[in-house]
Image: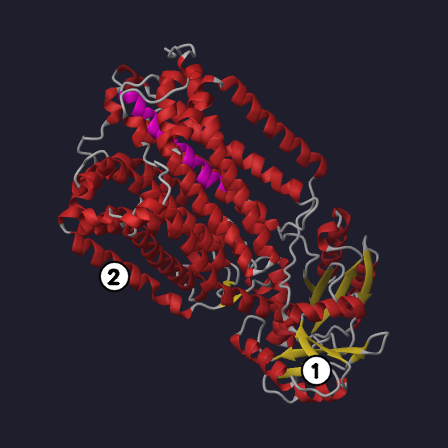
Amino acid sequence: MAGFLYRVGRFGFRRRGFVLVGWLLAVGLSVGGFIMWSGTPTNGLEVPGTEAQVAIDTLRREFPQAGGEGASAQVVVSAHEGQKLTDPANAAAVSELVSRLGGSPQVVDVAALDERSTSPDGRFGIIDVSYGVDGDELTTAAQDGLTAALEGARTAGLTAEAGGNAVEGGQPELGNAEIIGVIVAALVLLLTFGSMVAAGLPLLTAILGVVIGFTGIGLVSAVVDMPSAVSTLALMLGLAVGIDYALFITSRYRSELAKGHDPEEAAGRAVGTAGSAVVFAGLTVIIALVGLMVVNVPFLTVMGLGSAGVVAVAVLIALTLLPALFGFAGRRIFGRRARRAPAVVAGEQKMTLGRRWVMMVLRRPVIAVVAGVAVLGIAAIPAMDLRLGLPDDGTAAADSSPRKAYDLTAQGFGPGYNGQLTIVVDGADADAVSATVAALPGVAGVSPARASESGTVSIFQVIPTTGPNDPATTDLVNAIRAATADVPGGDVSVTGITAVNIDASATISDSLLPYLALIVGLAFLLLLVVFRSVLVPIKATLGFLLTIGATFGTMVAVFQWGWLNGLLGVPATGPIVSMMPIFIIGIAFGLAMDYEVFLVTRMREEHVAGAEPRAAIIDGFSASSRVVTAAAVIMISIFSGFMLSPDLQIKMPGLGLATAVLVDAFLVRMTIVPAVLALLGRSAWSLPAWLDRILPNLDVEGSALHTPTPPVTEEEDSAPAVELAR
């Protein structure tokens, strides 16, 4: 592995013009293709095989409009306190509102107010608006028509707000998050390297990778339903790993130059050693993301595959484009002071902050382990109260129209009106089923049954007494299914957005342990090959379990319990978004193994070179801790930037991943890991003889490159010398 990547690095350095043109061409083709052929992201959630999804498929066949075909908006209107919508002036305003909505572009139906859609006190009303296209096909004119109709009603003295999938604003602006992350990353890189050129290379390569990944996802969306969240994840993850991978290789390149190697040789050695760690770190992230397929939720499968592609691009760019840029940078990879005395950069034996820290940890390793585990255990306590659900308009920003419409509906009709259930009766007596359901505790009301044109299927609505994300509503869904499980002559199923969310949360929750076992098992095998040790991979995975417990505990404390809500801008408490835990497990595991690989491979490299276990830990940690710290700070900054979004589906992973990196990098990998390795001593690096014979020796540490004359081909040996830039 190291020898192959060594040759890749030297090739990239020598043929830098060819490599640069190739990547610029790739960027141009991907951007051009994106402009001409990209598709439109979707926001639908389907969970094949669940009762709610099967019922939706039936509705699409028997009741196309009820089955969710086309966008819809729910316009909620209310009169002033003490007034009714039937008062003459208010009635005229409502009539004008209905007329304006009906005349808006792409609208196919507007349901006027009646007894069912007016609150018992006559003050509140809900007007359902149906469009002839899906939400992602609505034109600006259609959105403007809805907005204008609402403004007209407000001018006439009514309170008017709108929710539903036709309402504009589903995709938040992410520009601030990206800009903040890049600015912080640039400052950290500049402080780490002391050179504008060295700081700029990781940023440049990461941005190119994000552009290719983002536009590639857009191209794939032309033929595959691509959730809009995939693009957000591509930005978040692509920036983070792209900067990190380039940072590690750039740091090693500077170190090899400082040892006296010529630039081409230094590029080869940097890619052969740090590049090997990048390959295996990237593989762990890719394994974790591709593993999302086991959940069998198309949304997560596409998200995982799309994100894995972005990570793969980041790895390829770091291994090929970065050494080419080294060739263009020359000695400007150092700051001016370092160019005058480059040996200062090496600094492995200087009493740096990292060296002081690891020596302090190793003086009391038992205390470091016990204290670290105790802190993480306490932080994980709130995770015992973890509840899963999906966001609705009740968790939207407080000043948004969907949130206001949600609150008005709850005020006028009760909280359950926001989470109505649809009962699908196929071949059975719908009236008898309706009577059975109406008698159940937790049911506020039941609508009359309506039959399809074929006469074989009927539907009716159930209004719970509790909101859509209330645990009592989940209990009601389960109670309805239990009470109607043995209806004679047909089948009864529960669906609707609330039921779909409940089934999706249950499916994802049931998949958490199998998914965790899969990625941990595969990563264990990968780390077994990387470190040629049994105890190191076990220690790495146990450390991750501590990280994920503390991460989930933090998320529950903030998003469910409301701690620091005002400071973090969380609009409302509620369950954790159902796909978030499994998504964070995948990403956080990959990133945790990144730091494990980068730190511990350098320790193993020192051990393989002949250092005693304790000295290997100190020297390896000292050589890699500064750059790992910089990488962690950059990731934390990028992920934290996404917490500025008002959308919980972006704010949650921002906080979760920032917490995971903070905990894993500084508490687990930089404190607990060196302490555990010190306690294990030589046994940490031992491997049974029979297993040693079976495992391939990939030479991740690049031990073959530490000879005075590394192996080169005839072509490489005859390559012209590269003159350093002065």
State whether the magenta stretch is mostly helix, strand or loop.
Answer: helix
Which of marks 1 and 2 precedes in the sequence? 2
Q: Which residue is mark 1?
A: 446
Q: Nearer the viewer, residue 39 or 524?
A: 524
Where disc 2 sits, the SS reads helix
> Which of the numbered marks, if any, corresponds to residue 374?
2
Q: Residue furthest right?
A: 453
Where disc 1 sits, the SS reads strand
Q: Which residues are magenta?
A: 238-259
- Does the rendering let one see residue 189? no
Specify whether 442 is left or right of 677: right
C-beta proximity under 8 Å, tags 2 and 1:
no
Q: Amino acid at mark 2?
A: Ala
Q: How many marks?
A: 2
* Residue at horizontal 42 percent and vertical 11 percent from the top: 718
Q: Amino acid at mark 1?
A: Val
Residue 61 screen position, x and y as percent: 79, 67
Q: Nearer the viewer, residue 134 or 329?
A: 329
- Does the rendering let one see residue 454? yes
Residue 681 screen position, x and y as percent: 18, 48
Q: CA distance from mark 2 to mark 1?
A: 52 Å
